[in-house]
Image (cartoon, grey):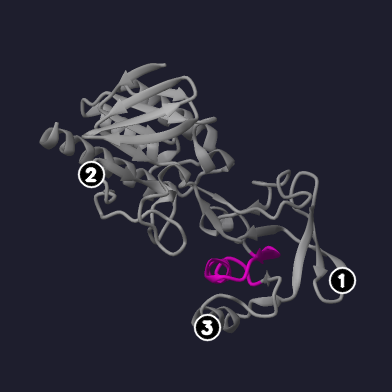
């Protein structure tokens, strides 16, 4: 097994990882980015990226990612399609192993992100980006005054329903239980805005050809079903931070990695950035910022400790 030496290893090639790669490589560090599949993460699902500051007119997530990859490579970052199997630290050196190689560096960034929990129902995957969304801030503005359904019962679902109520007055939130799990104050505010509710209900299918056209709802008590016209479905049933490689790190109650404002974890030289990190807003712009800060702090760490 070949061992490759670097100054800075980044696991994850989403906006946080690619931003960090660009800043670190431009700053003179030898950088390796390891990504198990295609680069870009959740950004690749965006058909029109219109809320990234300075990026106008809108572009698609694939083009945005390709530009980030080319930019990072232009400054010298090396990007590998590798599935990481383990991380170890001995002394001041991290060793990251894959099936065929190992990579070593004094600094390491975890930018493996988080994935949305899905409903796994017919039509969800096929209509993702065509009316099915997991981000109200990202996609809500595409549906002004449209018939919007929100699925979920926690703080995120209720908060996103509140946000969407500023875009459309026809908002319905669907929850499988008879009461919401969200904080009472959030629920009270949501209801005061005239957002409709369907409790004890689940969505069993999302229908449409080129876009969302309707949803099938099943009552969990009576078992009856109904098909309702819909323009958009926003799913907020939770997120799963991808922390399998660093289970030893301290996390918040939702499972996200705790860092300080410098993206530093409790392990010296180990950083976390992007959606995997505990923070208040998960957007491309905040992920890119996290990555840049991590790169800056990694460079400073190397200067002071290596």
Q: Which residue is mark 2?
A: 268
Label 3 sits on residue: 184
Q: Is residue 138 left or right of residue 201?
A: left
Q: Secondary structure at mark 2?
A: loop
Q: Secondary structure at mark 1?
A: loop
Find the distance from the CA under tag 3 to the CA under tag 1: 28 Å
The residue located at (23%, 44%) in the rendering is 268
Comes first in the chain, label 2 or label 3? 3
Q: Position of residue 44 (x, y in %)?
A: 55, 38
Residue 74 or 268: which is nearer the viewer? 268
Q: Is residue 195 left or right of residue 43?
A: right
Q: Residues within 10 Å of mark 1 (few under 14, many from 20)?
A: few
**Residue on which the image places disc 1:** 223
> Alpha-carbon distance for marks 2 and 3?
40 Å
> Looking at the picture, does residue 171 appear above or below residue 81?
below
Residue 244 left/right relative to 266: right
Does 231 sit left or right of 57 as displayed? right
Q: Position of residue 295 (x, y in %)?
A: 26, 38
The stretch drawn in magenta includes residue 34: no
Label 3 Cα neighbours within 10 Å, binned few <14 / some 14-19 / many ≥20: few
Q: What segment is highlighted magenta in the picture?
A: 145-169
Q: Position of residue 41 (x, y in %)?
A: 51, 39
Q: Nearer the viewer, mark 2 or mark 3?
A: 2
Q: Alpha-carbon neighbours of circle 2 within 10 Å: few (<14), some, or many (≥20)?
A: few
**Distance of label 2 from label 1 (alpha carbons):** 54 Å
Q: Quadrant of the C terminus?
A: top left
Kindly indicate the quadrant of the structure image that contains residue 7.
Answer: top left
């Amino acid at each position: 097994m070949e061992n490759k030496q670097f100054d800075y290893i980044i696991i994850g090639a989403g906006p946080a990882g690619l931003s960090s790669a660009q800043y670190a490589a431009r700053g003179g560090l030898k950088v390796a980015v390891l990504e198990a599949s295609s680069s870009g993460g959740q950004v690749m699902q965006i058909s029109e990226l219109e809320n990234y500051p300075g990026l106008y007119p809108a572009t698609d997530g694939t083009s945005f990612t390709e530009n980030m990859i080319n930019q990072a490579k232009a400054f010298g970052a090396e990007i590998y399609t590798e599935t990481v199997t383990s991380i170890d630290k001995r002394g001041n050196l991290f060793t990251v192993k894959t099936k065929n190689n190992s990579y070593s560096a004094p600094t390491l960034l975890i930018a493996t992100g988080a994935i949305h929990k899905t409903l796994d129902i017919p039509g969800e995957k096929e209509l993702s980006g065509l009316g099915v969304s997991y981000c109200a801030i990202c996609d809500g503005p595409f549906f002004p005054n449209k018939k919007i359904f929100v699925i979920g019962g926690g703080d995120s679902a209720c908060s996103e329903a509140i946000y969407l109520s500023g875009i459309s007055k026809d908002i319905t939130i669907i929850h499988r239980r008879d009461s919401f799990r969200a904080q009472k104050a959030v629920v009270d505010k949501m209801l005061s805005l005239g957002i409709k509710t369907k409790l004890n209900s689940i969505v069993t299918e999302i229908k449409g050809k080129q876009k969302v056209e309707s949803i099938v709802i099943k009552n969990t008590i009576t078992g009856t079903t109904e098909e309702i016209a819909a323009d958009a479905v926003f799913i907020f049933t939770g997120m799963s931070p991808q922390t399998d490689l660093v289970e030893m790190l301290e996390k918040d109650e939702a499972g996200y990695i705790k860092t300080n404002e410098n993206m530093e974890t409790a392990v010296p030289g180990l950083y976390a950035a992007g959606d995997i990190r505990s923070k208040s807003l998960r957007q491309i712009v905040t992920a890119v910022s996290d990555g840049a800060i991590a790169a800056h702090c990694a460079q400073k760490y190397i200067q002071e400790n290596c």
